[in-house]
Image (tube, rainbow, N blue to C red):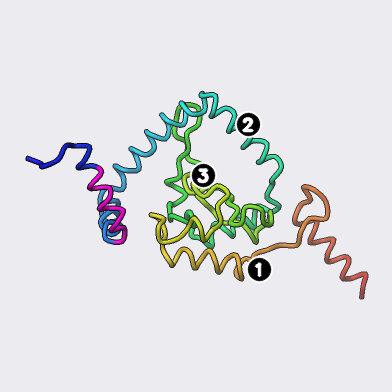
């Protein structure tokens, strides 16, 4: 027999958990590792069910309109080879939670479809190219939204690890320079054409 009702017991346990985040985080991670397949399948089912309801609601329709307009205005200026190298650098996993690309499913037409990782802006109003881009799963991409990296991805975030944070920092600050290609002179210019232009200009100068 419990000395309090169910509601009070839940409030007490949630308060205890919020006061001892570090302690419970270890147990949560262990539980996730043991029951990874089960939890992921439950998440997929829930996402498919709730996503369909939200899209059909008035609020959802309005939000998706705003999101669509924002996406049209903001386009990533990068070549396919740059994006491929970016994913390779992060081992074809989400830069924030480590979800592999082969487990990245997204609800599409009443079913869960395997999708590519999202091109995620680390700084929301920053550059549109490789310097400001990391691969992210749909969950992390939507959770981060317009928040800054340090405000969102810190110790209070369930998926946070210093190793992943440092890797993102290294990519944004230094390592992207190894993979960045010469920029297009005009819209949708092919990379091979741009490289040829650069070579011709070098020859003409000499």
Report the residue marked by disc 1.
177
Label 2, secondary structure: give it. Answer: helix
Report the residue marked by disc 3.
142
Say whether residue 27 is magenta.
no
Choose the circle earlier in sequence order: 2 or 3.
Answer: 2
Label 3, secondary structure: give it. Answer: helix
The quarter of the picture where residue 160 lies is bottom left
Is disc 2 surrounded by few (<14), some (14 to 19) or many (20+) residues within 10 Å? few
Label 1, secondary structure: give it. Answer: helix
Q: Where is residue 12 in the image (x, y as percent from the top left)?
A: 23, 47
Q: Where is residue 64 in the image (x, y as percent from the top left)?
A: 59, 32
Q: In which quarter of the image is the N terminus?
A: top left
Report whether 73 appears left or right of 200.
Answer: left
Q: In which quarter of the image is the C terminus?
A: bottom right
Q: For the residues carrying marks 2 and 1, which lies nearer the camera in this image? A: 2
Q: Is residue 33 visible?
A: no
Q: Give the range drawn in magenta.
A: 11-22
Report the residue marked by disc 2.
65
Q: Where is residue 170 in the image (x, y as percent from the top left)?
A: 55, 69
Mark number, residue 101: none
Is disc 1 surrounded by few (<14), some (14 to 19) or many (20+) residues within 10 Å? few
Choose the circle earlier in sequence order: 3 or 1.
Answer: 3
Between residue 172 and residue 23, name the one nearer to us: 23
Say whether residue 18 is magenta.
yes
């Amino acid at each position: 027999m419990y000395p309090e009702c169910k509601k009070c017991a839940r409030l007490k346990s949630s308060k205890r958990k919020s006061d001892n985040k570090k302690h419970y985080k270890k147990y949560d991670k262990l539980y996730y590792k043991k029951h990874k397949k089960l939890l992921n399948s439950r998440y997929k089912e829930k996402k498919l069910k709730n996503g369909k309801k939200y899209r059909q609601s008035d609020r959802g329709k309005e939000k998706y309109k705003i999101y669509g307009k924002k996406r049209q205005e903001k386009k990533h200026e990068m070549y396919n080879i740059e994006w491929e190298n970016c994913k390779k650098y992060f081992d074809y996993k989400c830069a924030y939670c480590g979800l592999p690309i082969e487990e990245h499913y997204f609800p599409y037409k009443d079913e869960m479809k395997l999708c590519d990782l999202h091109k995620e802006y680390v700084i929301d109003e920053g550059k549109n190219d490789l310097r400001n881009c990391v691969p992210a799963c749909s969950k992390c991409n939507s959770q981060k939204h317009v928040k800054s990296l340090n405000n969102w991805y810190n110790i209070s975030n369930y998926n946070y690890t210093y190793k992943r944070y440092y890797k993102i920092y290294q990519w944004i600050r230094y390592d992207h320079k190894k993979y960045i290609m010469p920029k297009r002179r005009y819209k949708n210019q092919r990379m091979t054409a741009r490289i040829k232009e650069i070579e011709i200009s070098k020859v003409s100068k000499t």
